[in-house]
Structures are given as C-alpha cells and as structure tokens.
Amino acid sequence: MNATTTTFPSTLKLKIDLTDEQFFQMCQKNRDYRFERTASGEILIMSPTGSDTGKRNVKITTQLDIWNSETNLGEVFDSSTGFTLPNGAERSPDASWVKIERWNALTPEQQEKFAPICPDFVVELRSRTDSLKELQEKMQEYIENGAQLGWLIDRKNKRVEIYRPGKDVEILDNPASLSGENVLPGFVLHLDQIM
C-alpha cells in the first residue's frame, strides 16, 4: 500500500457576504478557529496556533505586557484579538499595542467587539506553515492603516523584518533583541526564546 501525502493550505479563503455583526458572531461561536477578513471581504479561516508557535508567541506578549505595566502608556493585546482597520479589514496580529489615549477615545461598545482602530504596534510571528509573502502583505497593510512600527519575526529564516511608515523595510539577520524605538520607549524584546 502506497502512502500519499496531502498538502492543505495553512489558510482557507472564502468569499461570504457578512455584516460586521454577523462576522463578529461567527468568530464568537467558532472559537476553535481564527478568522480574519480582508478589505475586499474575503474571510480567512486559520487553525489554532501550533504548540511551539503558541509558546513563543506568549513570550512576546509577556515581555510587551511587563514593559507596558511599568509605563502605562497603552494597552497590550494577544493573538486572539481582532481589530477593524480603516480599510475595512478585520485582522488579528500575534501581539499588538495601542496608545492609551487612542484606546480611551473608543466607546465601551467599540472596545468590546473588533475595535475600529489599527494598533500603533504589531508583531507577526511566522510559523513553519505560514506564507512569508502573505505575512509581508499583512504587515504592509498594518502600516498603510496607521501602525507606527511592525515586526515580522521569521523564525524559519532567522531574521526580522521591521516595518515603519514612509520607510523601506529593514531586515535584521538573527538579532538578539529588538528596540521599540520611539513608539514603545524603553521597550526591548529579547529574542533568545522566540527565534
């Protein structure tokens, strides 16, 4: 008997017309999956993160939250948080941060659902099955919608791509740490347990 290998895409893409409320309710009722929606309305269905990626992802969020607890400059969000970007896309970065004054400007109702705001800072951690091209496009989308700093941590190639508005992408090969620059003053992400 011959064994065959079937390759499935890491993300399933569907075109379904849903209102914002219907999309939110679909996400709430199917918590075993991660959903995003593109600006054109295409729904992306992703499986939960693998254990190794999840372990590394929590290290990012923990370091970011410790810094934020000391500075109280904003709010930190994990990978299960959805945001409605200005272009209409609903995205869930692996880790993100919003300045406190921007977050507080939202109503309680807006904060409860997929907040209509682009985070000031976003991180995407590439897992083994993630498409680098798709993640790069997603990072560019964050910047085009108002993010001030973005890190694409590519474990597979041992490099980090840094995204900033109005600047070319900076690529660092196997860095030990990353600086939050003036967006996250004093924040340093140590990569020894992430890369």
Image: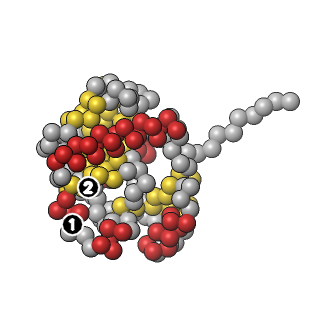
Q: Position of residue 163 (x, y in %)?
A: 26, 42
Give the left or right position of residue 194, taking residue 177 as reference: right
Residue 175: which disc?
none
User: In which quarter of the view is residue 98 placed?
Assistant: bottom left
**Helix, strand or loop at mark 2:** strand
Q: Residue furthest right?
A: 1
In which quadrant is the C terminus drawn? Answer: top left
User: In which quarter of the view is residue 8 placed?
Assistant: top right
**Which amino acid type corresponds to the residue marked 1 in the rendered image?**
Asn
Residue that carries the numbered disc 1 in the rendered image: 104
Residue that carries the numbered disc 2 in the rendered image: 75
Q: Tell me the residue at 28%/26% (across/down).
A: 175
Is 25 placed above or below 186 here?
A: below
Point out the tag, 1 or 2, that comes first from the N-terminus: 2
**Helix, strand or loop at mark 1:** helix
**Camera-side residue: 170 or 114?**
114
Q: Is residue 175 visible?
A: yes
Give the left or right position of residue 20, taking residue 178 as reference: right
Q: Tell me the residue at 78%/31% (across/down).
A: 3
Q: Position of residue 58 (x, y in %)?
A: 39, 41
Q: Position of residue 42 (x, y in %)?
A: 49, 62
Give the left or right position of residue 23, taking residue 177 as reference: right
